[in-house]
Amino acid sequence: MSGITVYLDAVLEPPRALSPRGFAVVMLLVGGVSAVCSIVFLAMQAYPVAGFFGLDVLLVWLMFRANFRSQRLRTYIRITAETVELVETDAQGRTRRRAELPSLFTRVRVAERGQSVGPLCISASGRSYAFGSFLTGAERRSLVRRIDDALRAAKAERSTGDTTGVD
């Protein structure tokens, strides 16, 4: 039984900045400070100001919720001797974009702009796809090296049938 050799099977996901417990602590602190400030303004009979503190807590909660939703984005990269498959999913796990490129002609690069690192691009046959915008510059460079190594191994297998370059 001959299986397909996978040279790279990676899942890219945004970093998680705050754990659920950390989120609860932050919301308790924000809510507590807002409650104390609201009580002070209520004591001064500045009723509308107290309501704005409640709106601030709601706004902070909504922003964190949007941030947590964006952290569920995923990019999958799979490299075999035949193809490079790039799949991006949204926060609900639905496929947003899918690209299948021939591994023999696929190139990956990261645009260097002076001191900063630009987007990752994978391209073949006149088609180019940017991905991994949430990765740091060092992570992008490292991923380019890993993809290049996997592409070299895939091309070697395709041309010689050698599968010794398996990652």
Image: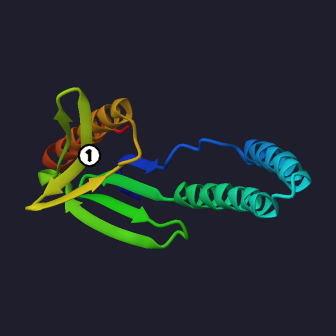
Determine if residue 99 is in view. yes
Q: Quick one: which residue is furthest to the left in this view? A: 126
Q: Residue at x 16, y 54 (%)?
A: 123
Left or right: where does residue 72 sit relative to residue 55? Answer: left
Q: Residue at x 18, y 50 (%)?
A: 158
Instruction: Give the colouring mode of the picture.
Output: rainbow
> Disc 1 marks which residue?
120
Asked if residue 163 is positioned above or below residue 85 in the image, the reply reads above
Residue situated in front as seen by the camera: 137 or 83: 137
Question: What amino acid does circle 1 point to?
Answer: Leu
Left or right: where does residue 3 sit relative to residue 41? Answer: left
Task: Give the quadrant of residue 62.
Answer: bottom right
Residue situated in front as seen by the camera: 56 or 29: 56
Asked if residue 98 is positioned above or below residue 37 in the image, the reply reads below
Residue 5 location (% of width, % of height): 35, 50
Residue situated in front as seen by the camera: 160 or 29: 29
Figure label count: 1
Left or right: where does residue 138 sit relative to residue 42? Answer: left
Determine if residue 161 is in view. no
Residue 148 location (% of width, % of height): 23, 38
Residue 78 location (% of width, % of height): 36, 54
Q: Residue at x 16, y 52 (%)?
A: 106
Residue 137 location (% of width, % of height): 33, 33
Quadrant for the C terminus in the image: top left
Quadrant for the N terminus in the image: bottom left
Q: Secondary structure beneath disc 1?
A: strand
Left or right: where does residue 12 sit relative to residue 20? Answer: left
